[in-house]
Image (tube, rainbow, N blue to C red):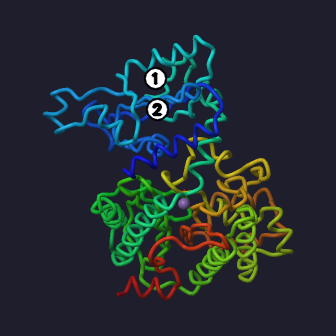
Amino acid sequence: MFDKEIYRQRRLRLREQMKDGLVLLLGNHEAPMNYPANAYRFRQDSSFLYFFGLDEPGLAAAIDLDAGAETLFGEEATMDDIVWMGPQLTLREKAAKASVTGVQPFAKLAETVQQAVKKGRTIHFLPPYRAFNKILLHELTGIAPAAQKESASVALIKAVVALRIQKEACEIAEIEKACKVGYAMHTAAMQLCRPGAHESAIAGFVEGKAIAEGYMPSFPVILSQNGETLHNHDHSQTLTGGRLLVIDAGAETALHYASDFTRTLPAGGRFTTRQKEIYNIVLEANNHAVSRAKPGITYAGVHLEAAKIITLGLQALGIMKGDAAESVAAGAHALFFPHGLGHQMGLDVHDMEDLGENYVGYDNDTQRSQQFGLGSLRMGRMLREGFCITVEPGIYFIPALIAQWKQENKLSQFINYQKAEEYIGFGGIRLEDDILITPAGCRLLGEKRIPITVEEVESTINS
Ligand code: GLY
Ligand code: MN
């Protein structure tokens, strides 16, 4: 945990931004895998972590905005708990670590909420995403799970986003640690990358690097020679010379701050000329975005600049054609770059996605596009100092998508379908780094950039 004063200050700022009512912040509970005592690795709710730091199941908190009182709800450990899990702090001791003085048994939460409901006070809660908390919230408020997302408090969502989006120095230090382990994960993978190696062996090693640090992966490792499938978690193939291996993986520190990096490797140790041509377009888009990101411009604008580099690069290879600006405006590049340039990163690898992507990545000034590709951009809003975001352009040749667009003759003034079809089987390339927006621009997060040029990647694989 950080110092208890950090959590107290965060709650104070939350209270300053909210008017009245009762704020409910629900921690997570154990989630059984296949029988109750065999649970998934516990992951605390990120907003609960942000305001209370207590990383264990079975807790909830209420902040009474009118009385200014804060209460932690939980159970005291039983002797059975101590026998199976070792010595435990009392609830009051746990609360003290987060500078909270009020404690109540978990069962009292219902009484607290119901009293507030009876008095007609507003109950502010965040959109729940786990079944346990949906059922609990139903019991507490009477709001059915299906209606909870739209009943969640917009005021609370906005206040939480406003605080969590701007990273504090202690948070940036944690993200730096996650990036350092991300570096180790990716360079380890590069050293295992050779024909005959199994994807699953590399994936296991990559995850193991995070776990060996006392960390965990920030999301299930994406690792596949079929990198044209954007989130490919299938690791069942053997590496074959001539193919590309996309690895998208990051670490989450013990305090749960994330990193998120993608590198694309030549499975045989050397890129072919054709692979290099596409690779260097993606690299240029990544470098350009890093050189452009700064406070006061929108990330949607940076995304479109990256899209233009991809368009020009693919035009030079004869895969795209026509006026580049018109092509980008029409979204023709999305046939090859169907996702967004990046997302916020922090206590979640897609930071605060549970609160609603549009509250995090968009605001009144920047609305989300409906266009295919651009509509997948999670983060479009104006950049501000203290944002941590990913930069992850890519080029993919997705057979089904190419076939569909060709059949519809979609945007054929900008796409040379015959040429695009020559790349079926190429796979995909994505190159992802993490940046911090600084007063005048941005900087790459991590002590060292993970090898990224063709030469750096080849020499790391072959070292
Ligand atoms: N790293 C996976 C993603 O950003 O969606
Ligand atoms: Mn990412």
Up the image or down, 246 lies above or below 44; here it is below
Question: Considering depth in this image, is 376 or 227 the residue closer to the camera?
Answer: 376
Q: Position of residue 64 (x, y in %)?
A: 53, 27
Q: Position of residue 230 (x, y in %)?
A: 55, 59
State if disc 2 and disc 1 touch (CB < 8 Å): yes
The residue that appears at 35% across and 54% down in the rendered structure is: 254
Marker disc for residue 136: 1
The residue that appears at 40% across and 18% down in the rendered structure is: 108
Marker disc for residue 376: none
Task: Report the Cα–Cα distance between label 1 and label 2.
Answer: 9 Å
Up the image or down, 346 lies above or below 22; here it is below
Q: What secondary structure is found at the residue carrying circle 1? A: helix
Q: Amino acid at mark 2?
A: Leu
Up the image or down, 293 lies above or below 210; here it is below
Position of residue 229 in the picture relative to residue 384 (left or right): left
In the picture, which quadrant includes the C terminus? Answer: bottom left
- Residue labelled with disc 2: 26
Q: Amino acid at mark 1?
A: Leu
Q: Does the Cβ of the disc 2 residue fall within 8 Å of ligand 1?
A: no
Q: What secondary structure is found at the residue carrying circle 2? A: strand
- For ligand 2, give the image quadrant: bottom right
